[in-house]
Image: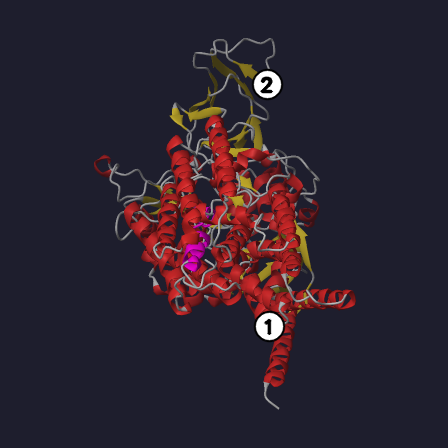
């Protein structure tokens, strides 16, 4: 508010206000939502509940009890490096707050962490406004609140690690402005380096944005106003070199994390990089107008929606006026206009969108860089309003006309996340704010306070609407599930000198092993290496680019991956089934073959079975394992290949023998001349239910397995086994193996497909009988030459093995990585990759001591670069200090 009469507040007061306003607003909203301890809910939802809270549990456990798990963990699927996971999820210095909260109160720690991060976002933005853009009055908390509670932060607060980048962004921009002003770039390098370490993914987007902002900052600066052409060119070159140099220095400071993480990404997120050059549009351009309305969000916007651009009425009006505000040079405004147009194209054109997302198509949560566009809006909106007292009537009328057209458009489009009341509220707020802007030149003392109040009400309403449109995990069942895990694991956790894996037929998340700290075979994270999901998918497990779920195991896979204990859920007594304090343990696997295991213990909620066939972490194998290649969508054939490769003896019959399906019963299905089971079936009457049922009878107590076509998902058909809904993991991309029966001879099996659409196409539907006797022979044969573990940690394993000439390959069910070094009798040997995924070495006949040690690839090289960069920062700082001392 450009006026000599306006009230000036102390910087300290404005900064405190910028922190406290979002903190208390969000606290009040959480209380109103009934977030624990003020109610029964937590803030755990979607990925925050399915990934991040488990990783935070692992974070606490690692720092307090098991520091070697910092680099490698066998809780991550069948094992995996942790550099990528830490860099993406856990490096935030703010996570240290979680150490203050016991395990059972992790959701409370998450709430506190969110409040602090959101408040710090407002504080850092206010600091930028004060330090660089002459922020002196209540416009500072008005615009800092718009930043802290903008739509992007509210709807993405569940991505708790992303918020670090929003805290650091204003400080990075302040550092860049210092470089443009001719000051030292050390502050810029330190903050950008910290941001790259804390959360590299969104900071990558910030780095791209800095290129555009540098051009914008160069254009808007006034240093060259009286320069000659040559002086101006030298100025531009000097600032560009400084910007480039200090940016590289920032990367160097974070190299100890970035370099090993980059290598890790080659097997994780980066391996999913899209190479398709697509210039198509994601949505009609005008649809983006819907995201400037209060509460313009619902769950459907998460998997595939529009960019989150809500910044509040004051901020967006101020920015739009900035584009025509003659208090700023035409060059600056033209540059800002071009950048704005480019940003909107980036949020729509497929290829540009991929560039912002490191050349990937984001899985859910689209347009993740939209926070940078919002920052650009809010910052320049502040600059415009801070320098402007007179607000022209013509602009207000134009804006009213455009708003009316926009409102009519979004109402006609009938967006699912917008109601007429939301549209009306937004329109009325715009009218009210325009009136206040028109009154500003009269310099009423109450105007700034009223503008602040309007912003508080609007941003609070938007946050409340957005957050209440999601469902959350309740505190009591979350803690109940932790209690179930701790109870079932109490007597079966691996001792310090041994290793084996533990799995179960139910889960709260694929990362239960991180929550309860045990070695498993399931995992879900955005940094998961591709080899393990690839292996699991080819063996018939549910998998995706970043997920494996050990929910369709067989006797063979249990043995192969060393699953020594399998836990089965028990139904709750009817008297407490609907009690909200208990977590409902729902099976996601059908495992009648557990009858071949020994029932070891039984608790109130679970049964624990001990697997007598479980192999060690390492075992010797014939040389033919090296040439065993697995194929996609051939899970039983792939398991057969591995069993054959492990067997020394010649085989006269397969381990998995296909069983003919002789009986096929159809209901409301058109007849066909084809007798082939694998074809397309169509309803006769589309208004009636239709089903297809296969029937067979077991001829032995051996396990029977069915291969389920990957195209038959939960949207196509409901599956039933013997008239009951089938327990299976419903999301998968490869053919899945389903255990139909086991342990019962002459058992009649009915497997039914209930149509959910007019037609159903079936491919590769086969049933197999597993040769239990031959399997036991191969297991006994393999156990005679398996690794006896003497000591075990996450990064160091020692043991011994007796090898013979028939099995010259020592293989481990550990994902292959250059980080694993293997010593045989004290001498390092070359490692091999078997089954395109697992670690192995050659071994001579005889008794050998074995030592495996994991060292994060490129960690020391990255650390050396970081130390060198830190030395450069120290030298620059000392020179700067020496230059400022009086002579």
Decide which of 34, 306 is in the foreground and name it: 306
Q: Position of residue 69 (x, y in %)?
A: 49, 63
Main secondary structure of the magenta stretch: helix
574 vs 324, nearest the viewer = 324
Q: Point out the stretch of residues depicted in magenta.
A: 139-156
Crowdedness near tag 2: few (<14), some (14–19) or many (≥20) residues, C-alpha within 10 Å: some
Q: Residue 430: image x %, image y %? A: 43, 41
Note whether 828 is above or below 518 in the view shown. below
The residues bearing labels 2 and 1 have C-alpha atoms spaced at a distance of: 67 Å
Quadrant of the drawing holding the N terminus: bottom left
Please tell me whether mark 2 sits on a helix, a strand or a loop: loop
Query: Does 141 appear in magenta?
Result: yes
Q: Which residue is mark 2?
A: 679
Seen in the picture, residue 662 relative to 794 is either above or below; the reply is above
Where residue 84 appears, as percent x and y from the top left, is 56, 57
Which residue is at a point 44% across and 44% down the rendered structure image?
434
Q: Position of residue 146 (x, y in %)?
A: 44, 52
Q: Quadrant of the C terminus?
A: bottom right
**How many C-alpha atoms fall within 10 Å of the one at disc 1: few (<14), some, or many (≥20)?**
many
Q: Which residue is mark 1?
A: 186
């Amino acid at each position: 508010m450009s006026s000599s009469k306006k009230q000036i507040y102390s910087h300290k007061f404005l900064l405190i206000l910028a922190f406290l306003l979002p903190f208390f607003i969000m606290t009040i909203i959480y209380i109103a939502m009934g977030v624990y301890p003020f109610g029964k809910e937590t803030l755990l939802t979607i990925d925050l509940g399915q990934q991040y809270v488990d990783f935070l549990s692992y974070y606490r456990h690692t720092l307090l009890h098991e520091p070697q798990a910092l680099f490698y963990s066998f809780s991550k699927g069948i094992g995996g490096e942790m550099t990528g996971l830490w860099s993406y999820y856990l490096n935030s210095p703010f996570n240290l707050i979680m150490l203050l909260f016991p395990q059972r109160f992790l959701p409370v720690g998450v709430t506190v962490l969110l409040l602090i991060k959101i408040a710090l976002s407002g504080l850092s933005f206010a600091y930028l406004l004060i330090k660089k853009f002459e922020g002196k009055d209540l416009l500072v908390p008005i615009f800092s609140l718009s930043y802290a509670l903008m739509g992007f932060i509210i709807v993405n607060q569940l991505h708790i690690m992303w918020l670090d980048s929003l805290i650091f962004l204003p400080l990075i921009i302040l550092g860049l402005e210092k470089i443009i002003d001719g000051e030292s770039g050390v502050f810029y390098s330190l903050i950008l380096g910290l941001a790259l370490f804390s959360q590299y993914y969104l900071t990558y987007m910030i780095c791209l944005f800095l290129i555009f902002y540098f051009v914008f900052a160069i254009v808007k600066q006034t240093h060259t106003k009286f320069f000659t052409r040559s002086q101006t060119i030298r100025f531009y070159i000097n600032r560009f070199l400084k910007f480039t140099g200090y940016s590289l220095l920032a990367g160097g400071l974070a190299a100890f994390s970035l370099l090993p993480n980059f290598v890790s990404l080659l097997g994780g997120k980066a391996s999913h990089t899209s190479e398709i050059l697509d210039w198509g549009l994601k949505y009609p351009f005008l649809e983006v107008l819907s995201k400037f309305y209060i509460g313009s969000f619902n769950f459907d916007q998460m998997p595939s929606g529009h960019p989150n651009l809500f910044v509040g009425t004051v901020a967006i009006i101020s920015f739009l006026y900035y584009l025509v505000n003659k208090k700023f040079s035409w060059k600056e405004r033209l540059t800002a206009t071009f950048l704005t147009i480019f940003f909107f194209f980036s949020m729509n054109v497929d290829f540009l969108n991929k560039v912002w997302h490191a050349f990937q198509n984001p899985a859910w949560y689209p347009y993740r860089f939209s926070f940078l566009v919002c920052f650009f809006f809010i910052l320049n909106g502040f600059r415009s309003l801070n320098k402007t007292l007179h607000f022209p009537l013509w602009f207000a009328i134009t804006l009213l006309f455009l708003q009316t057209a926009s409102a009519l458009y979004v109402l006609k489009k009938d967006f699912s996340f917008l109601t007429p009341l939301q549209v009306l509220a937004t329109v009325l707020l715009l009218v009210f704010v325009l009136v206040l802007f028109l009154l500003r030149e009269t310099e009423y003392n109450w105007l700034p306070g009223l503008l602040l109040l309007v912003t508080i009400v609007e941003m609070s309403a938007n946050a409340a609407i957005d957050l209440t449109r999601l469902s959350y995990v309740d505190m009591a069942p979350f803690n109940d599930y932790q209690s179930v895990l701790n109870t079932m694991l109490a007597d079966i956790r691996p001792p310090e000198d041994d290793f084996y894996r533990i799995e179960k037929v139910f889960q709260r998340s694929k990362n239960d092993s991180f929550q309860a700290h045990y070695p498993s075979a399931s995992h879900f994270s955005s940094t998961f290496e591709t080899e393990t999901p690839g292996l699991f998918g080819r063996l018939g497990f549910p998998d995706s680019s970043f997920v494996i779920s050990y929910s369709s195991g067989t006797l063979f896979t249990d043995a192969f991956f060393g699953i020594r204990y399998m836990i089965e859920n028990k139904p709750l007594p009817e008297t407490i089934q609907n009690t909200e304090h208990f977590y409902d343990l729902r099976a996601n696997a059908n495992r009648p073959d557990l009858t071949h295991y020994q029932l070891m213990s039984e608790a109130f909620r679970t049964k624990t079975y001990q697997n007598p066939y479980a192999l060690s972490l390492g075992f010797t194998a014939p040389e033919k394992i090296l040439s065993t290649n697995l194929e996609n969508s051939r899970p039983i054939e792939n398991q057969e290949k591995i069993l054959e490769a492990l067997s020394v003896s010649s085989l006269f019959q397969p381990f998995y023998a296909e069983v003919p399906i002789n009986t096929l019963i159809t209901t409301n299905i058109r007849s066909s001349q084809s007798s082939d089971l694998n074809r397309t079936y169509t309803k006769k009457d589309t208004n009636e239910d239709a089903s297809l049922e296969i029937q067979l009878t077991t001829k032995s107590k051996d396990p029977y397995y069915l291969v389920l076509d990957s195209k038959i998902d939960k949207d196509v058909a409901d599956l039933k086994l013997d008239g009951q809904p089938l327990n299976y993991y419903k999301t998968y991309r490869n053919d899945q193996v389903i255990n139909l029966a086991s342990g019962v001879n002459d058992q009649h099996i009915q497997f039914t497909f209930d149509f959910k659409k007019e037609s159903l196409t079936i491919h590769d539907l086969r049933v197999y009988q597993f040769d239990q006797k031959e399997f036991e022979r191969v297991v006994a044969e393999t156990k005679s030459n398996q690794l006896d573990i003497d000591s075990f940690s996450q990064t160091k394993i020692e043991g011994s093995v007796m090898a013979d000439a028939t099995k010259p390959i020592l293989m481990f069910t550990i994902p292959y990585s250059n980080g694993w070094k293997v010593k045989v009798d004290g001498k390092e040997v070359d490692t091999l990759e078997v089954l395109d995924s697992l670690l192995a070495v050659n071994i001579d006949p005889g008794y050998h001591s074995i030592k495996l040690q994991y060292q994060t690839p490129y960690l020391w090289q990255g650390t050396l670069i970081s130390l060198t960069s830190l030395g450069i920062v120290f030298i620059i700082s000392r020179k700067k200090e020496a230059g400022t001392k009086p002579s």
